[in-house]
Amino acid sequence: MKLENKVAIVTGGGVGIGLGIVLCLAREGTEVAIVDISEENANKAADEVKNLGRKALSVTGNVTDVNQVANAVQKTIDTFGRLDILVNNAGGESRVYYEKPGEEYDEIREWDDTVELNLRATMLMCRAVAPYFIKQKSGKIVNIASVAGRPSQGAGRSLDRTSGKGLEFNPITSYGVAKAGVIKFSRTIALQLAGHNINVNCICPGVLYTPMYERSVPWRMAANPEARGMTPREYFDNFFAPMVPLKREQTPEDIGNAVVFLTSEEARNITGQTLNVDGGMYPS
């Protein structure tokens, strides 16, 4: 096993991409602390890790809160006696436009929420583990961004064919900007921490059918007349999956396998890099 007896924190590890990462790490021998805002999801993920024969810790917490972040990191170290890996997976599109799908929303509140959920959370977790990694002169950090944070392609059309009206921002704007920030942040701290034998890298997933995606379908469909009458899965298959050159969607395990590689000794000389796991959608 590539990561036997290592200890990892995975934020947002209860479902979707996060759960895929958690299980891939566990299969390679990692003991995992699952930090998730949902106690139920965190507990279920911890049970799956234990079923694989590895130790697991379930931590309920909001990783945009500095005190809850500090508590999660300290609880992990107290429980396992060490920490080797941090995977910042928590994030996603703003929770604001899940509230009233298809209706007008507060752009400022949506922007702030998206940046907080994706960029602030990643920064806070890195800030919390860095002193520990520096002291032990080792550590692996993988931040999960998105192809939405890569340079835009085409003529300004977003992935789901929604568009802003005039100067209004569509929902993908803040998400793409926040994920671009995660990419830049990863590169910056990779250079700052390299002298301490700490690797920091970033992964950009492509298109995945996850619970987070499924929650976003109502507002996506409301903005796209062509989607009328479709199920969430049909919408994904018609408007998202065809964009992938390899003609297949990505899975949480695809992202998890990339995390395993970047946190293993095989990647010991890789830092400050961003890896697309997107079936060829975007250039590096």
Image (cartoon, rainbow, N blue to C red):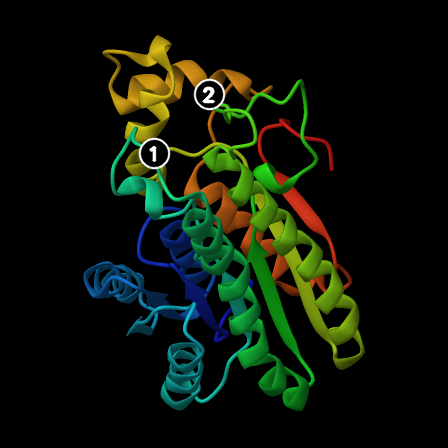
| Above or below, 23 relative to 190 | above
Q: Secondary structure at mark 2?
A: helix
Q: Amino acid at mark 2?
A: Ala
Residue at the location (44% across, 17% down)?
239
User: Residue placed at 43% from the left, 34% from the top?
Assistant: 208
The vertical placement of 209 against 195, above or below, is above
Picture coordinates of residue 136 (x, y %)?
64, 88
Q: Is residue 137 visible?
A: yes
- Identify the image quadrant of residue 245: top right
The location of residue 229, given as percent across then percent down, is 23, 11
* Residue indicated by mark 2: 241
Mark 1 crowd level (few <14, some 14–19, many ≥20, 10 Å Cα): few
Label 1: state its secondary structure.
loop
Image quadrant in which the C terminus is located: top right
Q: Is residue 271 visible?
A: no
Against 161, residue 109 (above or below) is below
Across and down, in percent, residue 184 comes to: 70, 55
Query: Given the current orientation, which residue lies at the most extreme front position?
Result: 166
Query: Mark 1 or mark 2, which is nearer the start of the sequence?
Result: 1
Viewer-nearest residue: 211 or 163: 163
Residue 128: % across, % down:
53, 80
Q: Tag 1: residue type?
A: Glu
* Relative depth, front residue between 110 and 141: 110
> In the rendered view, does 280 fall on the left or right side of 44?
right
The residue shown at (35%, 67%) is 34
Q: Which residue is mark 1?
A: 104
Mark 2, other Cα within 10 Å: few <14 / some 14–19 / many ≥20:
some
Q: Is residue 203 left or right of residue 94?
A: right
- Between circles 2 and 1, the one closer to the viewer is 1
Q: Is residue 147 left or right of residue 117?
A: right
Q: Nearer the viewer, residue 186 or 176?
A: 176
